Image: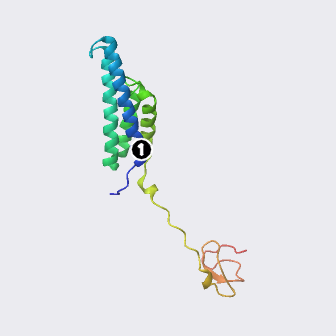
Amino acid sequence: MSSEKPGAAFILSLVGGLFVLLGGIVTAVIGAAFTLFIGGIGGILGVLGIVWGVLILVFASRLNSDPGSHSTSGALIIVFSVLSWVGAIGGFFIGFLLGLIGGILAITWNPQAQQPMQPMQPAAPVSAVQPGMKYCASCGAQMSASAGFCPKCGAKQF
């Protein structure tokens, strides 16, 4: 298994989850204050917002600890980010947006695409060029300077 992790998806989802959690806490406190007890509708919605925030944080952590489950974790981060509108005011919109982007990045993360590109080697070192010889522009094969076509790949030479 690769040691690479979807870092950007993890960070965005983690910060988004913190905003949703904060939105849930604010909603719970304000809702409880207006209804004078935590059992009121505002307090219950706030508790739901806290739950959504905690679940986003859990799946962001899972994304970091088990990159193989990136699609499932990303999908669940998106679901709970959307649900954050109920009870957490969407994490002040910032939490929703960061969770949504983080979840999408998690789903589309491809560890093979992150491998560094290898620099291309020159077709022939300049010191190896022999008088009266040239190299094919298509495949790099050595040929005589008067050749009209490459003997290796058949490309027309100019």
Above or below for 129 versus 16:
below
Which of the 4 quarters of the picture holds residue 45?
top left
104 left or right of 46? right
Residue 45 shows in the view:
no
58 left or right of 10? left
Which of the 4 quarters of the picture holds residue 11?
top left
Q: Amino acid at mark 1?
A: Ala
**Residue 34 position in % (x across, y down):** 34, 12
Residue 32 shows in the view:
yes
The foreground one among 20 and 9 is 20
The foreground one among 77 and 34 is 34
Snapshot colouring: rainbow
**Number of dots carrying numbers:** 1
**Residue 97 position in % (x across, y down):** 46, 34
Locate the C terminus by quadrant. bottom right
Please report the residue visible at 46 percent of the width from the left and 29 percent of the height from the top. 93
Above or below for 53 versus 107:
above
**Residue 29 position in % (x across, y down):** 33, 20
Locate the N terminus by quadrant. bottom left
Residue that numbered label 1 is attached to:
9
- Residue extending furthest top? 35
